[in-house]
Amino acid sequence: MRRRKIQQGRTAGILGTAIFGAAAVLGLVLASGALRPRSAIATQEQPGAITVTIDNFSFAPMQLEIKAGTEVIWINKDDVPHTVVSDDHKLFKSRALDTDEKFSFTFKDPGTYEYFCSVHPKMTGKIIVK
């Protein structure tokens, strides 16, 4: 009986330490902002070039509203190559962008332009030109 209580005490101690450790790690992650949601939609407030960041296998912002004549610059911050390709495969198409490489396109005409990464087709984005 005494042996069982000692074993239960050890198990409870180990479990308590594991829970405390997990809570501490979660606290650090939340404090760092790593789990903060990135804005999915951005609106241009003034003319000029707008940057879309490619990071963590996604485009940020995923949707962008801009004025006609605006240049959009995509920059790859991932450790793997990505592309930026219009859905029609004709309007714009980048080569594979390595880390910190950029691609730009100027949207002259109003409309909605959807695009994706041809290497990772689940990565999608949308530019709305007004």
Image: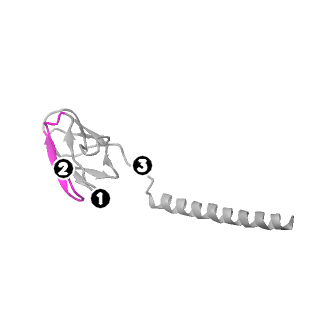
- Compare residues 43 and 81 and report the one nearer the observer: 81
Q: Give the residue displayed 16% in from the left and 38% down from the top.
A: 68
Tell me the residue at 16%/49% (across/down): 95
What is the C-alpha distance between the residues marked 3 and 2?
24 Å
Q: Is residue 109 visible?
A: yes
**Residue 79 % position (x, y):** 29, 58
Residue numbers of the magenta segment: 88-107
Q: Please state which of the two labelled residues, at mark 1 or mark 2, is closer to the viewer.
A: 1
Examine the structure image and report whether residue 49 is included in the region drawn in magenta: no
Mark toward the viewer: 3 or 2: 3
Tell me whether the residue at label 1 lies in contact with that at label 2, contact meaning CB atoms closer than 8 angstroms.
Answer: no
Write down the residue under mark 3: 37
Amino acid under disc 3: Pro
Please tell me whether residue 97 belongs to the stretch shown in magenta. Answer: yes
Corner quadrant of residue 100: bottom left
Q: Quadrant of the N terminus?
A: bottom right
Q: Main secondary structure of the magenta part?
A: loop
Question: Would you call the spot at circle 2 few (<14 residues within 10 Å), some (14-19), or many (20 or more)?
Answer: some
Left or right position of 110 against 10: left
What residue occupies the far top of the structure in this picture? 111
**Total number of numbered labels?**
3
Q: Is residue 74 above or below residue 8?
A: above
Residue at the limit of the structure toward the right, as seen here:
1
Q: Which residue is denoted by mark 2 in the rendering?
A: 49
Q: Quadrant of the C terminus?
A: top left
Secondary structure beneath dot 1 equals loop
Marking on residue 104: none
Give residue 31's position: percent from left, percent from top.
Answer: 49, 61
- What is the distance, in whole Å, between disc 3 and disc 1 at their CAs? 21 Å
Q: Which residue is mark 1?
A: 79
Precedes in sequence: disc 1 or disc 2: 2
